[in-house]
Amino acid sequence: MSRLLSSLRFQLIAIVLLSVLPAIALVLYSGFEARKTAALQAQANTRRLVELASTHQARIINESSRLLALLAENLLSRSGDTDQCSAYLLDALKKHPQYLNLGVIGADGKILCTAIPFEDHPDFFDRRYIQNAPDGGGLAIGASQFEPITGKAAINLGYPLHDKKGRVNGVVFASVDLAWVSDLAAYLTFPDGATLTVTDRGGAILVRYPEPERWVGKVVPDTGVLKAVLDKEGKGTVETEGIDGVRRLYAFTPLDDSAHSPILYTGIPTSAVYAGANHSLIRNLIALGLVTVLVVVAAYLFGNLVVMRSLNALIGTARRLAGGDLSARTGIPSGSSELKQLGIAFDAMAASLGKKALERDQMSEALHRSEARYRALIEQIPVVTYTAARDEIRSILFISPQVDRLLGFDPADFYQGRVALNKRLHEADRERVITKLSRCKKESDRFICEYRMLTSTGYVKWIRDEGVIKMNDAGEPLLIQGVMADISAQKKAEEDLLRARNDLEMRVAQRTEELAKANENLRETSEKLKLFAYSVAHDLKSPAIGAYGLTKLLLKQYGNSLDEKGVHYCIQIMKASEHIVELAEKINMYIATKENPLTIESVKLGEILEVLREEFSSRLVTGSITWLEPEPGIEVRADRVSLLRMFRNYIDNALKYAGEQLSEIRIEYQESDKFHILSVSDDGQGVSEEDAEKIFEMFQRSGRSRGIEGAGLGLSIVREIAEKHGGSVSVQAGLKKGVTFRCSISKDL
């Protein structure tokens, strides 16, 4: 097969075929355009058909509106007499056979009279047209359905019936027979396989042409053509598969403007739509195929007569030259054609080859003389040198005799040819070495490779082989010269180093796994401590509240019976209970601060400070304390609850522990490139440097808090808030009095 594809005769034929491709493309394009035109024409035809049906339905509805209005006016005096009313409606039905039934329904949904009586007396109160007619004051269109008496498909129309005072006391209805759709389809000329269908919105087939007996009454699944029609709504066209599995081009429209209008759609099989275009396309392709065959035959005969004769002469001469006959010539006469010019050039090349062969023989003799001198020199070098030809198998022309002493190989192994030498290559390195040799020969590049070879005793030796291509005076590649050295000791050292590194990596991996397990154990322990803390806080708080309540009750009921010391004890118990409850709440707050995720949002600092000012207003007024805060308009991105909790703890800390000297609380805002810096300062009792170093630790209290109840967790909570916001906390004592607490928040939240 590959020989056929590469032949010149085949290539000439391929060129001819390629020249025909534009014509094929043009024929295909014309065929596809014809299909497109046929589709557009079919769409227009089907669209005109459904528009004709829609117009006819609109005319029927208008006529029905006038008829029902006339019936409502004439029935004003007959609605009380059922027999007279039914007779009047029957007479009207005979005059208008396009209706299946006429009737009057009372305001309660009960039938008062009909042209064709019902066997039972159904309740029509839930019918849409019965409910809508009184409200609309005019014609109401109901959903399509099968008329219960005749079993035919119909659309029900309703018109309000008024009494003599103008009040609505019922509805006159008419059932419009949809058989006109089938009559219209039978009247028109349909292509083979074309269909016309009317369905309600639920998929029930009301009218079908042809084969109504097969399809009418069945429910179409919500797929295929019905799904496409419902998805597009209104009027339109679509190409899809019908309920009978035939693919058609459909046009569709609702029969009226109501939301529950039946849908009429007609479809023409795509096979009929595209039949003419397909026939024309096939005819053109067959004609083009015949022309192509004739052109290919002509190209084949012309190629044999004009081209192949000269080529065969060239091939025969090339084979003789390859066999060593440098006197061979093509015998092609001179001329201006390309093939004749090629023959002349080929003969000139043969003459040049003969001249170069003579030069090669002379060079080979000179090379042998030079080789003898070179051998004497390289046998003294402590590496193995070699000379190889640039042929396909890199034949060894010379290798230094010390190959046995230095590498442990018999020199004869190298002269047996590359195939035998490749067998000495280690199996894992053989393919790599052969590939690299081939690349270096192709690109005339240096050959540098490290590989393993098996000695005659089966011992594995690592060899480093480096070879370069030597050029002649004309710059043409002549032969390969290279050296080989034993690097087994170096490779062993590298393997030992790799083994040590792998061992170290394994130890590191084991240590990493141990650390991961330790971290997991630490996380589990942290979870247990958190649950324990919640449990302790709850278990402390409940008894403390109980003790506080009982002691307060004891003091209230029996305070007069207790002496001064008993009353003092009760007060101390109540204070201790309050302290325990505060401690439990602080523990819960600390855990919540540490564990709950942040909700980062833009927070106006003024709103936070306004809440806190109101919260602490009574204590500020009682202590005559001045409240100073920054200018309004400052916004930071942070967790609102955490920010409120941070300021509350700082301010509460100042009010509790600043002492009687406290006269001012100052809240300030600063910023750096990366942080918002919030601070709360007071001018009360300061803190020592010793206290400042540990004041943010859990359960740590400064010297100025002695004698004042507290849990020792407020500032720890502030530190957790700052760290979760990517910041930190600090405290700075004043020169003589007062203290400043700071909290920084990252701007990158």
Image (cartoon, helix red, strand yellow):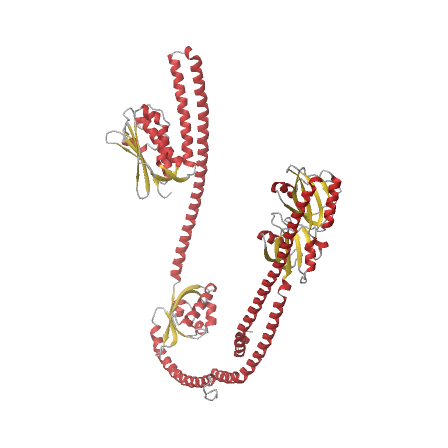
250, above or below 468, in the image: above
Residue 126 drawn at (x, y percent): 66, 40
641 left or right of 217 in image: left
* Front residue of this view, candidates 672 and 411: 672
307, above or below 158, in the image: below
Residue 387 drawn at (x, y percent): 39, 74
Residue 490 visible, this orientation = yes
Question: Which quadrant does the C terminus fall into?
Answer: top left
Residue 639 drawn at (x, y percent): 39, 38
Tell me the quarter of the picture where residue 570 sits. Answer: top left
**Picture mark count:** 0
Tell me the quarter of the picture where residue 69 sits. Answer: top right
In the picture as drawn, the residue positioned furthest to the left comes out as 736
Residue 123 visible, this orientation = no
163 left or right of 480 in image: right
Question: Which quadrant does the N terminus fall into?
Answer: bottom right
* Front residue of this view, candidates 487 and 644: 644
606, above or below 541, in the image: below
Residue 128 drawn at (x, y percent): 64, 43
In the picture as drawn, the residue positioned furthest to the top comes out as 561
Kindly identify the residue that appears in the image at 34 percent across and 76 percent down.
374
* Front residue of this view, candidates 212 and 1: 212
Kindly identify the residue that appears in the image at 53 percent across and 72 percent down.
22
222, above or below 697, in the image: below
* Front residue of this view, candidates 110 and 707: 110
604 left or right of 342 in image: left
Kindly identify the residue that appears in the image at 47 percent across and 89 percent down.
333
Tell me the quarter of the picture where residue 213 sits. Answer: bottom right
